[in-house]
Image (cartoon, helix red, strand yellow):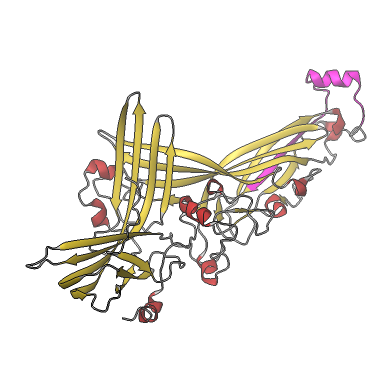
Amino acid sequence: MPPTARSINDELSIELLNPSTPSFPGSVILGRVMRQAPVNAPSATVRVRLQGRAKAKLVVSRGESKSYYRSRFKFWSESAVVDTVHDGPVSDADNGPLSWPFALAVPTHTSADALNFGLSEKERSASFVKVPGQITASAGIPEQPLPGSFYYDYSGFSKKWHGFVEFWIEAELAVQGTAKSRARVFKATLPIRINSPPAPGPPITDFRLETRNMPGCVSSHRLVPGMEDGELSFRQKRQRFFGSSKVPSLRYVLQVRYPTVIQLGSPSTIPFLLRVIPDREKSSEIIADVSQTLTIKSVELEVRTTVSIICPGTFDWHSTDQTRKVLLASTSTFSSLIEGGVALPFGADEKPLDLGALLGIKVDAMGRVLKEGRETPINSAPDSIIVPTYTTYCVKTEHELVWQVALTVAGESWKCSTTQKLLVLPQSQDMLTNGTESADLKGFTPGGVAALAFGATAIEFASNSASLLEVVAALSELDI
């Protein structure tokens, strides 16, 4: 059950008015149905439909046997979004191709009636989207804002699966039969991309920073003023080796403030704030009032994206997932900026160091991590794209921010790390309206753009739409 393929020929084809314009829920898709092959009939009907659905398939191998699990959710009925563009005789007497313009309005929400039609309670229970407050599927599957196009597949040793959300235009030419000819039906299909709606308003400035205090301790004779570069005696080395209490100890807290929300295409750098707060009461008395220098030895920030699918089974539902990593920043990618070490603020009253601003950490509208705040992505490969957080009936994506920081002080190393759930928002409505980044596909080959199917909720130019106010003018171009 792969995604719907393009199917056109001389008997029937579909052409979009402007294939370079992105489509969103609420857009109007404009185009024409064409027939190159000759046809003459006293009565024929031409209909154009927009279809949408979410599908998932899981194959589990158990030795020589395999189990197959499938999930399918239609977003609306076949008659919900349809345009009958011709109903009457057809003739190619002018020796030219026949052409019928169409306009299809993309729904803003799925339809609960269509989603639940024909599904058993077992099939309805295998859904990530449920009625709020309902544990079972007895109340049915609710509608939701229309999700954007999406595709992901995975093949492992014992599991093979894929999940996707797809949209396509289907045209049908039904020619009625006569005494001399039989009835015929010609069809054409054209997959299109519909993007998830952008986040309302301007780009976010509140990254909902989480604060984590990471306690640390370093013991060394070099913490004592004047001993920073001194040679340790045999006695001092022995004390250090056996962990003697006579070795001066510095106790401190590395205070880290990191985001729980980021947004694609935001002009702001992603904040990552660091500050060292000494614990003078628990530190050795000889260095309690000494200001120490803690420098960054290495740092790594990454976004872990987990894609999950769910399918009904014989007795219960089955789900599986796969996680991939996208590097936001590390000493290897930004070595020129922290070469030689960056000293951290030392003291509760000191202003934290914003490492995100220092490294210029940004993610563009396509989900590409930018290099040192410039417009050049570190990596444009499909598996290096960050996609928005995404949940629909049988497919979802979730994110975590994972960071690790290693410090050095008095020749000693110390490191800490943690993981935090992360919400990734799509590009803001204001930036899309202003066109600041939505049209920026620099650095992408045609194949690279196509490979962004994994990041389909980002802005991609692979479908055709117009606002309702533009429809009349656009239709006039189609010679209606």
* Residue 283 appearing in the image: no
Task: Name the quarter where the C terminus is drawn.
Answer: bottom left
Residue sitting farthest toward the left:
179
Q: Nearer the viewer, residue 151 or 259?
A: 151
In the image, residue 284 sits, relative to residue 153, either above or below, namely: above
Residue 217 shows up from this direction: yes
Residue 344 position within the rendered picture, expressed as x and y whole percent measured from the top left? 77, 45
**Residue ID at (34%, 49%):** 393
Position of 458 with respect to 83 (left or right) is right
Residue occupying image coordinates x 18% and y 72%: 40
Residue at the (70%, 46%) spot, across then down: 274
- The part of the chain drawn in magenta is 230-257
Instruction: Please count the marks in the image.
Output: 0
Q: Decide whether residue 247 is among the magenta residues.
A: yes
Where is residue 124? Give x, y as percent. 27, 45
79, above or below 217, in the image = below
Depicted 50 relative to depicted 417: above or below: below
Q: Nearer the viewer, residue 419 or 226?
A: 419
Residue 229 percent coordinates (x, y): 91, 33
Which quarter of the rendered picture does the N terminus lie within? Answer: top left
Where is residue 406, by image quadrant?
top right
**387 or 259: nearer the eye?**
387
